[in-house]
Image: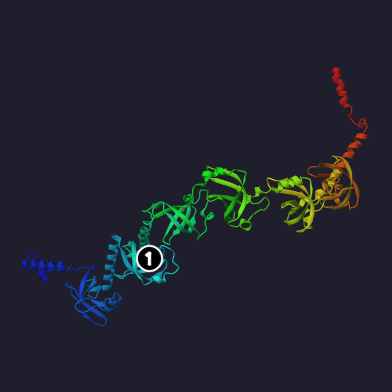
């Protein structure tokens, strides 16, 4: 080895030059793909020769099976391998044909990605979030997200598994060695090319026959033309009348004629119009007058009303609130059907907003006005109980399709309202008194107790401090329940109003049935309120006794009773 230490001699310099030239020629470096020549094939291994290496590396035969080269392998044939190590810990050369193929495949993917070229692949299996795609040329595995499989939702993709097809590379991670591909881009691109050819068939002004309603959104309606392209009719191009949403006019599957009004070749979109197929009906709106009655045709029925036409193209909405005077929560489809001709009165014409308002109920007399004319407030009328709830009855008035509201408090002057309400059943005939008619609000209030004399009228000629005789009905801790003589109403004398002396203000002093006098402490005819008090009666009686029986000389015999008079006299003398 001493010969290699001294490089100053001509022999050693020549040897170094020859050695370097040979190494640079073979370019043996770890991590590079090089060509190896097959020299020997056994049952388990394949031996390859690589110039510049000290020994022949060995490749496992199973590795060639994985990359599909086993059948092609023969002595003398060259195969690409990756030189992993020139010498491992055992002194052997380590190479890999599988890794060489993967790296070459990655280079091809990079090239296709940089040049925006599609690749040929096939879906091999499903995985979480998408599918695994194998690159046909190199065997590299790539990921295709579920959203990138097709341009429309697919319930089943079994027909796509194993089929060679084009994919677009949408993402490459060189550090991690991951690739993400898309089938959707290829499908959409093909459709775009086909769509461009279809659009070339149309021009502005063309009339499209029998386009089918495919769907709608808040801004317009989509139609399918000849099963090959979808076109849009914008909301403003549906009708000359105001349209809030296409579903007010169209139903899925209907056929309509369209007029092409715009073509965008960049966006591959066709805009159409329906209203431009007919003249603007608002040009002769002067033929119609507010307040006059016209026949309208029901075109479409919704939950909130009917869309009707005065003439073709001149549409208007008959709102559910304008269908009937008396029916509430109307379901229009139960009253009308498409194609019906009904009478309506025009209530509004707004030329600027291009809006017409109509009413069906105005074609018949307002039943509330008729009721007011025939049965003014205060009249008696018969009716049938149509329904009830926990606080009122509803009475259908005779010969009128009107329900009068009868509150429980208006059933009886004396009985408990809740108990009284339970006495009446649906379908029962009763006579009531009309208390109030609000024709604008479409409300009628009736009463039953108002048909009899009000027992509270017993207090009409009474006033505060008047003394009345009452009968004790019952007693409790709150006081006495009493009823004035010849009166049907019961009143409470509170415990604090039984007597002046607190010790005597005991309800237990009374057992019931006693006749006693009490004074009226408060009376309000409008509020139907009366307060009675025995204590007030005693106070009034004591005041009267003092006034009647007290003497002017009373108290004169008391000490200093005349002191004030003497002081007054002295003041006068001093002056």
List x then y, in percent, for residue 342.
Answer: 62, 52
Give the image's coloring scheme.
rainbow
Q: Secondary structure at mark 1?
A: strand
As drawn, 144 above or below 305: below
**In the rendered view, does 332 fall on the left or right side of 73?**
right
Can residue 141 be seen here? no
List x then y, in percent, for residue 79.
Answer: 22, 74
In the foreground, 181 or 176: 181
List x then y, in percent, for residue 521.
Answer: 83, 42
**In the rendered view, does 43 fall on the left or right side of 443?**
left
User: Is the residue marked by circle 1 packed among few (<14), some (14-19), or many (20+) residues within 10 Å?
Assistant: many
Query: Label 1 belongs to which residue?
Result: 144
Can residue 354 be seen here? yes
As drawn, 451 above or below 5: above
List x then y, in percent, for residue 492.
Answer: 83, 48
In the foreground, 447 or 75: 447
Q: Residue 39: which quarter of the image?
A: bottom left
- Looking at this rendering, what residue extends furthest in the left direction? 10
Q: Residue 333: which quarter of the image?
A: bottom right
In the foreground, 342 or 151: 342
**In the rendered view, does 50 fall on the left or right side of 373?**
left
- Looking at this rendering, what residue extends furthest in the top direction? 575
| Image quarter (top left, top right, bottom left or bottom right) of the N terminus | bottom left
| Image quarter (top left, top right, bottom left or bottom right) of the C terminus | top right
**In the rendered view, does 418 fall on the left or right side of 105?**
right
In the foreground, 151 or 234: 234
As drawn, 563 above or below 133: above
- Looking at this rendering, what residue extends furthest in the bottom direction? 43
């Amino acid at each position: 080895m001493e010969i290699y230490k001294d490089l100053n001699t001509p022999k050693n310099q020549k040897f170094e030059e020859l050695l370097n030239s040979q190494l640079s020629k073979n370019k043996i470096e770890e991590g590079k793909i090089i060509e190896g020549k097959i020299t020997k094939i056994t049952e388990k291994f394949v031996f390859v020769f690589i110039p510049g290496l000290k020994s022949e590396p060995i490749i496992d035969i199973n590795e060639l099976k994985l990359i599909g080269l086993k059948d092609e392998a023969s002595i003398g044939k060259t195969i690409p391998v990756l030189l992993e190590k020139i010498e491992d810990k055992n002194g052997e050369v380590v190479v890999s044909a599988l890794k060489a193929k993967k790296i070459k495949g990655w280079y091809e993917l990079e090239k296709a990605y940089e040049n925006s070229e599609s690749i040929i692949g096939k879906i091999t299996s499903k995985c979480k979030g998408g599918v695994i795609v194998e690159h046909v040329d190199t065997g590299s595995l790539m990921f295709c997200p579920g959203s990138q499989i097709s341009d429309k939702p697919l319930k089943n993709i079994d027909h796509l598994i194993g089929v060679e097809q084009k994919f677009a590379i949408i993402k490459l991670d060189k550090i991690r060695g991951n690739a993400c591909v898309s089938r959707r881009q290829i499908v959409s691109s093909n459709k775009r090319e086909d769509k461009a050819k279809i659009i070339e068939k149309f021009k502005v002004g063309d009339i499209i026959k029998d386009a089918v309603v495919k769907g709608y959104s808040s801004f317009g309606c989509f139609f399918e033309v000849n099963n090959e392209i979808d076109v849009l009719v914008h909301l403003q191009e549906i009708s000359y009348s105001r349209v809030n949403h296409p579903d007010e006019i169209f139903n899925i599957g209907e056929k309509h004629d369209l007029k092409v009004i715009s073509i965008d070749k960049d966006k591959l979109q066709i805009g159409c119009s329906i209203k431009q197929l007919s003249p603007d009906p608002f040009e002769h709106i002067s033929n119609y007058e507010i307040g006059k009655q016209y026949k309208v045709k029901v075109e479409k029925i919704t939950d909130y009303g009917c869309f009707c036409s005065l003439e073709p193209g001149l549409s208007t909405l008959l709102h559910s609130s304008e269908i009937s005077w008396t029916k509430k929560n109307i379901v229009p489809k139960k009253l009308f059907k498409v194609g019906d001709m009904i009478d309506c009165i025009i209530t509004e014409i707004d030329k600027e907003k291009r809006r017409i308002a109509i009413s069906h109920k105005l074609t018949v007399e307002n039943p509330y006005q008729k009721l007011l004319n025939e049965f003014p407030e205060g009249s008696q009328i018969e009716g049938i109980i149509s329904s009830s709830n926990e606080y009122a009855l509803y009475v259908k008035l005779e010969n009128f399709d009107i329900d009068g509201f009868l509150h429980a408090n208006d059933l009886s002057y004396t009985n408990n309202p809740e108990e009284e309400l339970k006495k009446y059943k649906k379908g029962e005939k009763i006579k009531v008194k009309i208390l109030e008619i609000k024709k604008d609000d479409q409300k009628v209030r009736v009463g039953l107790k108002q048909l009899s004399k009000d027992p509270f009228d017993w207090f009409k000629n009474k006033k505060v401090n008047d003394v009345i005789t009452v009968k004790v009905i019952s007693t409790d801790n709150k006081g006495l329940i009493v009823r004035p003589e010849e009166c049907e109403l019961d009143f409470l004398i509170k415990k604090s109003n039984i007597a002046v002396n607190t010790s005597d203000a005991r309800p237990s002093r009374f057992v019931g049935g006693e006749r006693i006098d009490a004074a009226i402490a408060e009376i309000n005819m409008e509020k139907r309120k009366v307060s009675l008090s025995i204590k007030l009666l005693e106070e009034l009686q004591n005041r009267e006794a003092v006034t009647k029986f007290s003497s002017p000389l009373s108290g004169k015999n008391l000490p200093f009773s005349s002191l004030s008079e003497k002081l007054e006299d002295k003041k006068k003398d001093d002056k």
